[in-house]
Amino acid sequence: MSVTMQLRATMQRYAELLEPTAVGRFWSRLLEVEFVDRAVALAAKLLVCVFPLLVLVVAIAPDETRQAIVNTVIARFGLSGGALDVLRVAFASPAETRTATGLVGVILTLAFAVSFTTALQRTYLRAWRRPPGGGIGNKRRGAAWVGGVLALFGTLALVNALVKGSVGAVVAWVVGTALSIGLWWWTARLMVRGEVRWRALLPTGIATGFGSWLYTLAASVWFPTTVAKNYAQFGAFGLSLAFVMWLTGFAFIIVGAAVLGPALAEGDDRLARWLNPTGDCLTPGSAAALPGPSRPMRLSDAFGRGGAGSGTTTPPGTATDEAN
């Protein structure tokens, strides 16, 4: 037997041992949702659809709130020099931005932001094996989610403006973490159309909220160096590459946390019984869950080969994976 075959056999044995555990279920569900492909798609949507919304919000916000948002972005990412100048150009004066945007631009920006929630919803529906559907209701949920995110930004900006110094930094971190957990818990419930019980979604809310907040804090360590190198080498395009890198990491947190919920709730240990005390994570009247994959997951499934390539990772008839 070759070394490659021995290694593959060893990995297969370990995979079989881990399969009934939460770790095994988590990894299998990650492959099922094609997590690499899913995270990259989310990151691209975030950059194209959500960043323009942030620029628009800064433009129409009151002066104090606008400055608090800009200062928070600068501090979190440690921007300086030419990269900082590029960011300041992006967040131009309110009058310039409003003049350049116009009513049609505002409507399109909001529509693009809502379109991001389509990709976000697919992630949660796939994680919980929910059937597609929802129609126009999905757009209303998307608009509600955008409103929730804007409310979070506004609240954090208000906290930063009211509480200064080191105490303010601690208060902002605590409040931001709590609000972020609440936002992502509600997001998970919203994106699965209320078809999964609140308690089963709690791990997703905690993992996304707390994980994204820690990730943002950690970015202040490595992101400034990355920005400086990229900007020196590629100019403004390098700054975009750095933000794409950060957004991709954030998207991996979203996807991983979405999968964590069903991986923990569908077990038979004490935590699973607490998360799923009735034995059914679905709310009354919800459609039955879609069947799982028709074959064992492979590492190649992480890259989105799905029904068109390495085999089916979605039930027949749902290969398009549309949320609406």
Image (cartoon, rainbow, N blue to C red):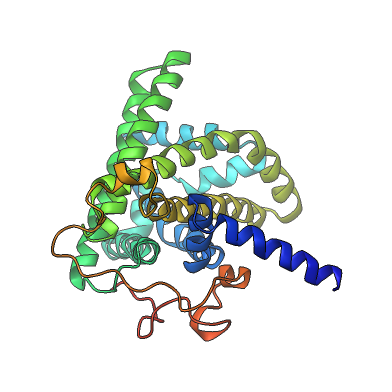
Residue 18: x, y in percent?
Answer: 57, 55
Task: Determine the image quadrant of residue 215.
Answer: top right
Q: Does any portion of residue 30 appear in the rendered image?
A: yes
Residue at image coords 43%, 42%: 207
Q: Give the quarter of the figure containing the N terminus.
A: bottom right
> Closer to the camera, 5 or 65?
5
Is 265 positioned to the left or the right of 279 in the image?
right
Residue 132: x, y in percent?
Answer: 29, 74
Q: Does any portion of residue 63 appear in the rendered image?
A: no
Residue 202: x, y in percent?
Answer: 32, 43
Residue 289: x, y in percent?
Answer: 29, 69
Residue at the extreme right = 2
Is 90 positioned to the left or the right of 322 in the image?
right
> Closer to the camera, 108 or 211?
211
Task: Determine the image quadrant of residue 183.
Answer: top left
Is 186 positioned to the left or the right of 242 in the image?
left
Q: Give the quarter of the figure containing the C terminus.
A: bottom left
> Closer to the camera, 32 or 194?
32
Task: Determine the image quadrant of residue 66.
Answer: top left
Figure check: 129 above or below 258: below
